[in-house]
Amino acid sequence: MKLWEKNIRKVVPYVPGEQPQGSRLIKLNTNENPYPPSPLVIKALTEMDAEAFRKYPDPAASLLTQELARTYGVNQNQVFVGVGSDDVLGMAFLTFFHSEKPILFPDITYSFYPVWADLFRIPYETPALDPDFRIRKEDYFRENGGIIFPNPNAPTGLEMDLDEIRAILQHNPDVVVIIDEAYIDFGAESALPLIEAYDNLLIVQTFSKSRAMAGMRIGFAIGNPDLIKAMSDVKYSYNSYTMNLPSILLGVQAVRDQEYFQETLGKIVRTREETKVWMSELGFSFTDSKTNFLFATHNQVPAEELFEALKREQIYVRYFKQKGLDQYLRITIGTDEEMAVLRRFLERFLKDNGVFSPA
Ligand SMILES: *Cc1c(COP(=O)(O)O)cnc(C)c1O
């Protein structure tokens, strides 16, 4: 072993879902939005002046924080933006989880949390979900160095109601509580109104799912101005210009188009509910997802077998070969056409395997 090798920081990285290439495939594995971004975004992109790229962008991304502040009814100094919510969450871990005591997050949740904790050497504990995959609020009523969980949780899709979130906040006035609301726009209730009462609450959201802009990399946090200032100070100590000019300008347009936003959300929620109906008929059951994905299990066929069969058909869904999750598939809600292809294949596959005979 070379001596320099012992000085290398060794980490086990987060593994995102596959990004297979090709036009024929149906991609339901990373919870992207099946619809294009707002027409306002597309228009602004075609009108963009590349000459502007000569200069550095605004390090505070003020145009975007201003638009978000207006939309969410907060002050501009309560908004932080970053390169996807992964960047925002990473900055939040680095800024707020600086205690000797372990931070807490569920054992089944967004699998990036333990990766950041390891990278930044933050001790952590992971209370188990209950048998119905719900977060038990009481598990978060003990001494800790900070709390983070998604609401709705991923990959379970389950929402925690505001009374339970309030109870967690009441038991934790001395640490920062972060709620990762990556899927909030698909039907769950945001904890945003609670930031007035709880100055230790940070809400994190993303443009990647509900605003159909995963490729642009835009995420944001809203909270008390002191929290936002602390995060900005850390960010300016690491990289001042995280957000490039196109994402600032196009992000503004995406936030402005509330009408298109509501329209596409409505379509996805409708497709989700319709998918639940025909999947039940095929022998699947799932949690009551308030997201743009279903967390589904079949009453006879192992999830891994379905995953492999779907993949051979160029239909990509997410499978976690992990204890507690290995009988489930996480299936992103696509367009009605994509879901129809999924349905036809599943009907045929289950019929061929003798587990389903259509009436
Ligand atoms: C998708 C996702 C994110 C990260 O999204 P970005 O693309 O980085 O904004 C964060 N948390 C959860 C729970 C997610 O599902």
Image: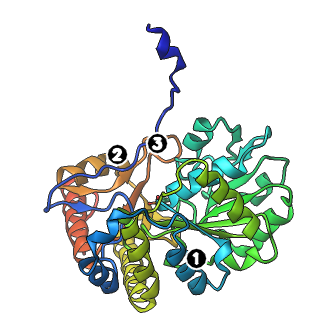
**Disc 1 from disc 2: Cα separation:** 29 Å
Q: Earlier in the sequence, mark 2 or mark 3?
A: 3
Amino acid identity at mark 3:
Tyr
- Residue beneath label 1, please? 188
Residue 64 placement, left or right of 164: left
Q: Residue at x 45, y 87 (%)?
A: 256
Q: Are marks 2 and 3 in contact (CB under 8 Å)?
A: no
Q: Is residue 171 positioned above or below 248 on the image?
A: above
| Among numbered discs 1 and 2, the one appearing first in the sequence | 1
- Taking depth in this image into account, of 126 and 224 the one nearest to the observer is 224
Q: Which residue is mark 3?
A: 14
Position of residue 77 measured from the top left corner of the image (x, y, whole percent): 67, 73
Q: Residues within 10 Å of mark 3 (few under 14, many from 20)?
A: few
**Residue 251 coordinates in the image, percent (x, y):** 43, 75
Going by the numbered disc 2, the residue's amino acid type is: Glu
**Quadrant holding the N terminus:** top left
Residue 88 as seen in the image, left or right of residue 359: right
Extreme-bottom residue of the structure: 259
- Residue 304 image label: 2
The residue type indicated by label 1 comes to: Ala
Hey, which quadrant is residue 245 in on the image? Answer: bottom left
Residue at point 14%, 62% (across, down):
23
Judging from the image, what secondary structure is the residue with disc 1 in?
loop
Residue found 25% across the figure and 58% down from its top: 350
Q: What is the crowding at mark 1: few (fewer than 14 residues within 10 Å), some, or many (at least 20)? A: many
Q: Is residue 114 above or below residue 353?
A: above
Location of the C terminus (image quadrant): bottom left
Query: Which type of secondary structure does the marked residue at label 3 adopt?
Result: loop
